[in-house]
């Protein structure tokens, strides 16, 4: 249950005929009370936001206008659990787990995960978050000034944009401990749990604080130049300095890196550039565009454009780097990769009694990290057809460079070995830096991507009662060595990096890659009986039909294996079988076999798998038609009644849920579609009425 209060006010004032002032403020308070499942496993939130904006516009002459804007956005959120402060619900303490927090604010159960295997997956105390309680506050201060000048054939804009961002957190990262059982020792994850054979144990009983800030500066100059009656050029240059986030109390810790090897922990005063990450001061982004109406082709426009755009470091890495320096009582212990168990639930941190170097999932940023940038370009032809359609057809492409890549388990052993070999040294003894008993993740600006597409669009504005929009895209996207598909609206079936010491095989299809997408929308006002006797016109006129048709090919996906075949502590991908096509023809796909399972094999110990990171198979696509019928009754001059019937998934077409396709090569249901019943299977009919008065 949530209670929300919002207050807003706005003031617009003309100081003089040439001076306009506008001011707006919105305050919001949201109190959310979680619904308990068992009586105490709730999570409550108390959030407050302020949004303030102001504008001052000065008109110097009819050709020169200046606009100054400022803004402030602030959000504060407090989160607590139903177990917070309740001694009787100090479950982790009652279980006598070592090293758990004794603070009343942290009372609650531990996190216990029994991962997927022949017995299935289980979670114990699943409804209690591992992280928290916590308090966070985010702030954004923005100032920008833009002057616009009209001079002859030139319309010039120049401006500056300043944004200061702040991220403040106080939280307990893992005060009650988290424990994972995966069947490594008995072949059954549930049996491992019952016997107390832990595969991974982690805990951090201390509260950490972060106070991150950065000032982002942008300057730009743009000229829209009407070269001739039929030709306009758009020329511009933008400069961005996106300052890396820093902690106001200098609590950040980073890992100096030699290639991908971990060397030592550093703090700001000993860092390579006097700060954790060097700021990138070379972010110049040219922009050029044109619009040309050729005289020899009537009712046609040729458009083209090119630009460079920059992106900042994601806050997750600086946030983790600030927490790491405070995590001096953080422990993470990995069980043996195979054979006899050596980490037990009754005393899981026995081998990690001394806090310090054994940090919990230490994040880091390459000190030489550079801001990512993307080059975008397009060439399109627009033509007005005799039938009233405005048709656009063009090529659209982009190239990403220095994209952020998170290197997982960066401190993994370099040498590939057989994990089942007798006498194999423990994994921690084989890491490049044995001071860190836990693998470390690091962000590096080494990623890249390419995107090429044919995009066609036909738009018919209202004429003779008909409005229609048709769009079709044929495209391909490739990236490596990692992917952000799910973060930008794409597929979430993305494989991870397998071998961090050789990234040549990590380039593959993007998770967001959709080969073809078609969308058609139509609105038709039935032209019959718009005139005639009032009774007949009211009964038989005023009808409107509309439809939306969507067809889309499926997202690419990986094949999951997850077994450590290299002795490096991370899972490998399966093998691709030569001569076997992974995707079946459309007429051969069934719910029992969506793709060719014979195209993949389990990888033997002693090497990495050969299957691609993403794009080993294609998941089901989408085909859907939504249809609506409207009838409008004019009751009086200012009153009318609208009846609406809507048919979602009109054809009752079965769209398979992509996530229901079993991609686990060790699963008994490998290649099957979730028992054949998951997905969007039903037609929904909705009837409504609306009275306008």
Image (cartoon, helix red, strand yellow):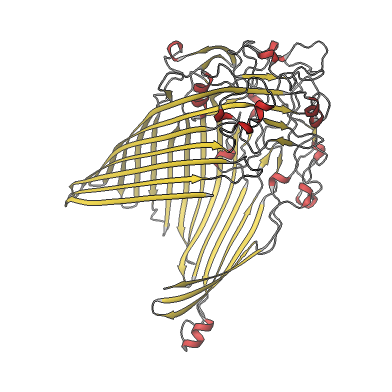
Indicate whether 203 appears above or below 293: above
Q: In this rendering, would 657 be left or right of 364?
A: right
- Location of residue 433 by image quarter: top right
Indicate whether 81 appears above or below 4: above
Residue 369 appears at what percent x and percent y?
Answer: 49, 22
- Location of residue 427 by image quarter: top right
Residue 514 appears at what percent x and percent y?
Answer: 62, 45
- Asked whether the viewer can see residue 178, the reply is no
Q: Nearer the viewer, residue 684 or 75?
A: 75
- Asked whether the viewer can see residue 395, the reply is yes
Q: In this rendering, would 383 be left or right of 7?
A: right
Q: Nearer the viewer, residue 683 or 583?
A: 683
- Location of residue 509 by image quarter: top right
Q: Nearer the viewer, residue 256 or 108?
A: 108
Residue 517 appears at what percent x and percent y?
Answer: 60, 51
Q: In this rendering, would 531 be left or right of 37?
A: left
């Amino acid at each position: 249950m949530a209670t929300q209060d919002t207050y807003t006010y706005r003031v617009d004032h003309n100081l003089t005929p040439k001076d306009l002032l506008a001011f707006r403020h919105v305050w919001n308070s949201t109190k959310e009370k979680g619904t308990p499942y068992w009586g105490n496993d709730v999570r409550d939130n108390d959030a407050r936001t302020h949004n303030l904006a102001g504008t001052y516009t000065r008109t110097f002459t009819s050709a020169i206008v200046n606009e100054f804007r400022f803004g402030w956005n602030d959000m504060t959120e407090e989160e607590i659990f139903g177990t917070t402060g309740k001694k009787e619900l100090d479950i982790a303490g009652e279980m006598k787990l070592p090293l758990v927090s004794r603070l009343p604010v942290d009372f609650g159960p531990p996190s216990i995960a029994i991962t997927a295997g022949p017995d299935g997956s289980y979670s114990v105390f699943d409804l209690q978050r591992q992280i928290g309680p916590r308090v966070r506050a985010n702030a954004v201060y923005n100032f920008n000034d833009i002057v616009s000048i009209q001079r002859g054939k030139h319309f010039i804009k120049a401006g500056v944009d300043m944004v200061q961002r702040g991220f403040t957190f106080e939280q307990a990262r893992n005060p009650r401990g988290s424990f994972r059982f995966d069947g490594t020792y008995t072949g059954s994850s549930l049996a491992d749990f019952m016997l107390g054979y832990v595969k991974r144990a982690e805990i951090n009983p201390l509260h950490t604080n972060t106070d991150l800030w950065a000032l982002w500066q942008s300057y730009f100059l743009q000229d829209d130049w009407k070269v001739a009656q039929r030709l306009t050029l758009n020329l511009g240059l933008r400069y961005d300095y996106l300052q890396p986030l820093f902690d106001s109390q200098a609590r950040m810790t980073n890992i100096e890196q030699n290639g991908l090897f971990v060397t030592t922990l550093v703090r700001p005063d000993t860092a390579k550039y006097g700060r954790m990450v060097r700021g990138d001061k070379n972010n110049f982004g040219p922009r050029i565009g044109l619009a040309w109406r050729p005289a020899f082709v009537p009712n046609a426009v040729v458009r083209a454009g090119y630009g460079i755009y920059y992106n900042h470091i994601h806050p997750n890495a600086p946030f983790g780097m600030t927490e790491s320096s405070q995590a001096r009582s953080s422990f993470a212990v990995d069980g043996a990769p195979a054979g006899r168990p050596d980490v037990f639930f009754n005393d899981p941190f026995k081998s990690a009694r001394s806090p310090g170097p054994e940090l919990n999932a230490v994040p880091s940023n390459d000190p030489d990290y550079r801001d990512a940038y993307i080059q975008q370009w397009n060439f399109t032809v627009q033509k007005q057809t005799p039938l009233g359609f405005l048709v656009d057809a063009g090529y659209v492409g982009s190239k990403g460079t220095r994209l952020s890549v998170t290197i997982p388990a960066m401190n993994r052993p370099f040498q590939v070995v057989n994990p089942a070999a007798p006498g194999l040294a423990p994994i921690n003894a084989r890491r490049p830096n044995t001071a860190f008993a836990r693998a470390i993740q690091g962000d590096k600006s080494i990623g890249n991507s390419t995107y090429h597409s044919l995009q066609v669009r036909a738009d018919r504005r209202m004429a003779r009662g008909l409005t229609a929009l048709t769009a079709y895209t044929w495209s391909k996207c490739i990236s490596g060595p990692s992917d952000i598909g799910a973060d930008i609206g794409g597929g979430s079936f993305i494989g991870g990096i397998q071998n961090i010491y050789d990234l040549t095989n990590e380039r593959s299809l993007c998770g967001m890659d959709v080969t073809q997408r078609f969308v058609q929308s139509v609105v038709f006002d039935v032209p019959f009986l718009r005139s005639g006797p009032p009774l007949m016109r009211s009964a038989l006129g005023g009808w409107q039909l509309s439809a939306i048709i969507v067809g889309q090919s499926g997202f690419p996906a990986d094949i999951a294996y997850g077994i450590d075949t290299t002795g490096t502590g991370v899972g490998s991908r399966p093998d691709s079988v030569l001569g076997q096509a992974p995707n079946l023809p459309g007429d051969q796909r069934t719910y029992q076999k969506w793709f060719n399972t014979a195209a993949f094999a389990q990888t033997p110990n002693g090497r990495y798998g050969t299957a691609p990171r993403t794009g080993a198979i294609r998941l089901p696509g989408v085909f859907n038609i939504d249809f609506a019928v409207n009838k409008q009754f004019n009751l009086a001059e200012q009153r009318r009644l609208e009846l609406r019937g809507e048919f979602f998934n009109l054809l009752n077409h079965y769209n398979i849920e992509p996530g229901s396709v079993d991609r686990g090569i060790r699963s008994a249901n490998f290649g099957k579609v979730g028992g054949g019943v998951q997905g969007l299977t039903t037609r929904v009919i909705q009837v409504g009425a609306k009275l306008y008065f």
